[in-house]
Image (cartoon, rainbow, N blue to C red):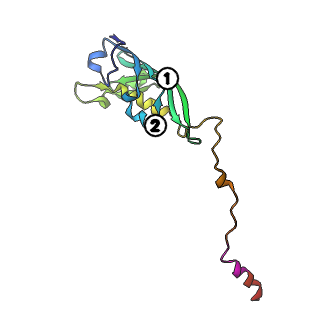
Amino acid sequence: MTTTDKQLPANIMLEKWADIGFFWQGALTIAELPRLAEQAEIDGVLAASVALAKTDGIIWLNYQLSGTLLLQCQRCLEPLSLQTQEQYRLAVLADEAQTALIDDADYLLLDELGAGNVHKLPIKQLMEDELLLGLPLSPRHDDCQMLINDDDTQEQEPEDNPFAILAGLKGKLS
């Protein structure tokens, strides 16, 4: 199935799409990624493509995300643009015995996606997780200069030390 005119579903039903394949291409907005919205804004939209296909009994999910995220610089508090253009590949495995077939690729187990005959792959959540993991811990501009308030840089007069009297008495007592 190829779709480009509809919104990306939150979940992909593996029983329905694993054998025939699934492809989606389009744009994601910040409203579709609420956890990301708490950390960043999207400058426009994120371009995304998703492909799900079964190869040699293993379901492979490939997706790409590209666009610009706007973060707040932790030094100057001004907006900071972060370009993202990432490709992800994830295997969906029936059991852990299949891990030998995927050459250290990232994977999910079907048991993690639901019980019984209904396995929903939370595609939007996976995309959002990857974007959140890619955000810098403390975003800042490379050439950022902290704004310095002149009032804070003035030297303050030394305060009277209450123990200064005791220091003067020290020599007199001996």
The residue sitting at 51% across, 34% down in the picture is 71
Magenta residues span 160-167
For label 2, the SS is: loop
In this view, 33 is above or below 24: below
Q: Earlier in the sequence, mark 2 or mark 1?
A: 2
Q: CA distance from mark 2 to mark 1?
A: 16 Å
**What residue occupies the far bottom of the structure in this picture?**
173
Residue 90, quarter of the rendered image: top left
Residue 106, quarter of the rendered image: top left
Specify whether 172 is left or right of 121: right
Q: Position of residue 105 (x, y in %)?
A: 45, 24
Looking at the rendered structure, the kind of residue marked 1 is Gly
For label 1, the SS is: strand
Quadrant placement of the C terminus: bottom right
- Which class describes the residues within 10 Å of circle 1: few (<14), some (14-19), or many (20+)? some
Specify whether 97 is left or right of 118: right
Residue 142, quarter of the rendered image: top right
Task: Using the image, tell me which numbered label, if any, was put on residue 67.
Answer: 1
The residue sitting at 36% across, 25% down in the picture is 123
Q: Position of residue 23 (x, y in %)?
A: 37, 14
Q: Position of residue 75 (x, y in %)?
A: 59, 42
Looking at the rendered structure, the kind of residue marked 2 is Gln
| Residue bearing the label numbered 2 | 39
